[in-house]
Structure formats: structure tokens, C-alpha cells
Image (tube, helix red, strand yellow):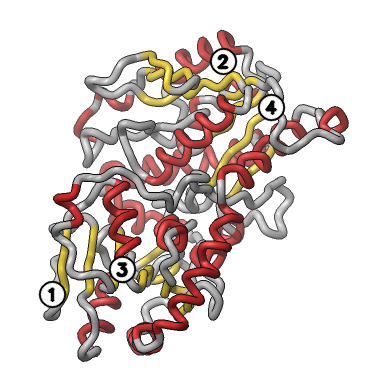
Amino acid sequence: MLAQFYPPIVGGEERLVQDLSRDLARRGHDVAVATLLHDQLPRFEVDQGVQIYRIPSTARRAAWLFSEPDRRHAPPWPDPETVAALRQVVRQHRAEIVHAHNWLLYSFLPLKSAGKARLVVTLHDYSLVCAVKRLMRHGRQCSGSQLLKCMRCTSDYYGSVKGLPILAGNWLMSAAERAAVDMFLPISHSVAQGNNLVGGRWPFQVIPNFVPDTLGAPQPFEPAYAAQLPPDGYLLFVGDLTADKGIEVLLQAYAGLENVPPLVLIGRRHASQPLSLPPNVMVLDSWPHAAVMEAWRRCSLALAPSVWAEPFGLVALEAMAVGCPVIASRAGGLSDIVVDGDTGLLVPPGDVSALRAAMTRLIASPELRERMGQAGQHRVSEFRASVVVPRVEQVYRALLGQQDEMVGQSSLAPVDRRVL
């Protein structure tokens, strides 16, 4: 696995790479992870059978390049030190499959032609066509790439000094990526469409993110977190409290409701985006995952009103896993998860009136919420690790020409394959 960050540096993508690596190791594969070296973390360790190599990067030495010192990402071009370190790890493990997840891929591309490893890339965002990775411009979905427009956008996002080099690097390396990758794995149909894979000549399969088979079961958590919550039955939003996540739309919709349960927001505030909170709204800082799952368990309604095309929408799955109906935007990967009228309701992104009407409808009908909650729990079974990880294995086997030998075997049968 190639991932620029790996736990204890935590995010949705990092947790997915860790879960996939651990699950593949449990299923009999020889799994290593190459990730960027960060201060205070060991250069090598073993995590539940997964060998983790934290490798150097020339770019990370220039601390001024990064807005978050603890998340110094890979540049969108081959990094000399990283290329050299990856060469050693690939040779040591005799990797048959290299499975990349972000821009760290670009430091492997110079090594691809010299080895026999097949290259798989999971697309967690829109980086194949967008250097900002979000396909958003001025708060709206971008209509497509154009040189001058992209130059302004990347300069606004990364700063004038870094924007143009990042744009040029991503544009050049994306072309090399398309030529070298043996299989793209976009995590949703939206990601496949947004990266121009649909109708193109590049091989891809949509394989979604997954959740542990145990998700939804009670987990130990610090009771002090639950003590901050209002009585059961509140409405809940989990995520960054930003415009892209639809927080402004949600607050406007909620402000127009009367005699309704409290609204709880769990997530990071951003100083650049101050919030004007209507009455009966509670804001809690970022919580550990077990405490968030308990918050989902106690709420009556989950809200995911993203304005941008979320590549996936893991929070919707987490809410559904404990039987909570979801109101989400009909945008991005959320449309792959929430079945409108069955597991929840889908509304047009940014539509305050539609969101308010959906909230009113479900708040007024406990029976409908109960039915949708049960349907959601059934829907989550399609995204469990025991269902999704065998699909990833099948991609590996097909690329290695092992399809025939798998005939008649259970999809859960472990096969010795080396995955980096």
C-alpha cells in the first residue's frame, strides 16, 4: 500500500487504508505499507501483521510549504528521496501488487517499468483531473478544467507561490498515471464520472469504501462525551463545520423549524468560516470514533447536507449502521449509499426549502424513521469488509492472471499474494 499518511495520523482515507491492510493480512497476504516519515513516529513497525515503512521525503524538509505541519503531504511529482526508499521496499518485499491511494503514487511511477508489480490506484477524490481534488469552484461544482480557470483556482487554494507548480505537476503526472495504472478503483460512481473514467479507455471498477463487520456494535467510550449530549432524539450532523459540508444550508433550514428536537453538530470549526447559530443548536468539538458512534445511536435523524460532491460519505454509513435514517444531498457518493425513500431522503444540494421539508417529514413520523432505520441497517451489509475486501482481492487475482485457479474456492479463502 502507498499512502502519504497512515495512523496515528488519522482521517477517513487513512482509516480505510489501515482497515484494508489489516484485513488483507488476516486473509493470508503479505502486506506492507509505505507512508511518509513524520516526526516522533518510528521508521518501521508491525501493526496486526502489516509491516509499516515510514520513508523520507525531500519536500517535507521545507516546512514552509505546508499549512499543516503534522500533515506534510506528498508533492504531485516524484520526490528523489521517496523514490529511492520505495525502490528498496519494493525489492525487499518482491511486491506483486502495488496499491496506491494518493500523490505518493507519483514517486512510484519511475519504478513501474523496471519491475513486474501490477499497479492499482484507489481514487478517493477527483485528483486525476483537479489539482485541488474537489471539483469545486466558488462554492459550486466545477464545469470542467480550463487552463486559466485552473490556474486561478489552484493559486487561491494553495497560494500563489505553490499553486502553479502543483497544477503543472498534477497535470503532467496524471497523464503518466493514466498510462501506467493497470486498474483504477474509484470509490463511487461520482468519483468515476468526475475523473472522466466513464466512457474513457482506462480500466476501472467502482469499489466503495467499507466499514468493519463489527460497526454498529456497542464500543467502549468515555462517558464524559455522552454526558454532553441532550436527551435522546436530537438531530445530528458530524463533519467539518464548513460551507462545503452544507453547514450553512443546514442552519438556515433548522432556523425555520419550530418545536423540534435540538440540533447537535460534532466537528471542527474553521476560523475562516464563522457560524451564526440559531437557538437550540449545540456545537461539540471533534470526538473519538467510539463516542461519535454512541452519538449516532442516541439521535433520531442524521443529516449530511453536503454542497460539494462528496466522493463517498462515510458518516451516512455509520449512522445507518445503528439504525438511524439519513437526510443527505443528492450529490456525489452519498447517492450511492442513501436510497431515497427507503433508507432516508435525498434532497438537492444547497436547497434550504427541500432540506427543511425533509426534516419536517421525518421528525413528524416516528414510524417512518423506524422503517428507514431498519432498511439502512440492511443496506450497510453491502458495505461490510467481508463483502468489499474480496472484491479488491478479485482485482488483484485478475491482474495476476489467477482467475482460473480461484474457480470453486470461497471468496473468503486466503491466497498468498504480496501487496505493497
Give the mark toward the camera: 2 or 1. 1
Considering depth in this image, is 335 or 184 the residue closer to the camera? 335
CA–CA distance in space, label 4 to label 2: 22 Å
Identify which residue is drawn at 33% across, 65% down: 245
Side of 122 where 400 appears, left or right: right
Side of 41 where 74 appears, left or right: right
Which type of secondary structure does the marked residue at label 2 adopt?
A: helix
Identify which residue is drawn at 48% across, 45% down: 214
State yes or no: discs 4 and 3 in contact (Cβ < 8 Å).
no
Crowding at mark 1 (Cα within 10 Å: few <14, some 14-19, many 20+): few
Residue 162 in picture, x, y percent from top left: 30, 42
Q: Which mark is residue 276?
A: 1
CA–CA distance in space, label 4 to label 3: 39 Å
Quick one: label 4 or label 3, which is nearer the N terminus? Answer: 3
Please name the residue that numbered disc 3 is placed on.
299
Give the mark toward the camera: 4 or 2. 4
Please name the residue that numbered disc 2 is placed on.
90
Considering depth in this image, is 173 or 122 the residue closer to the camera? 122
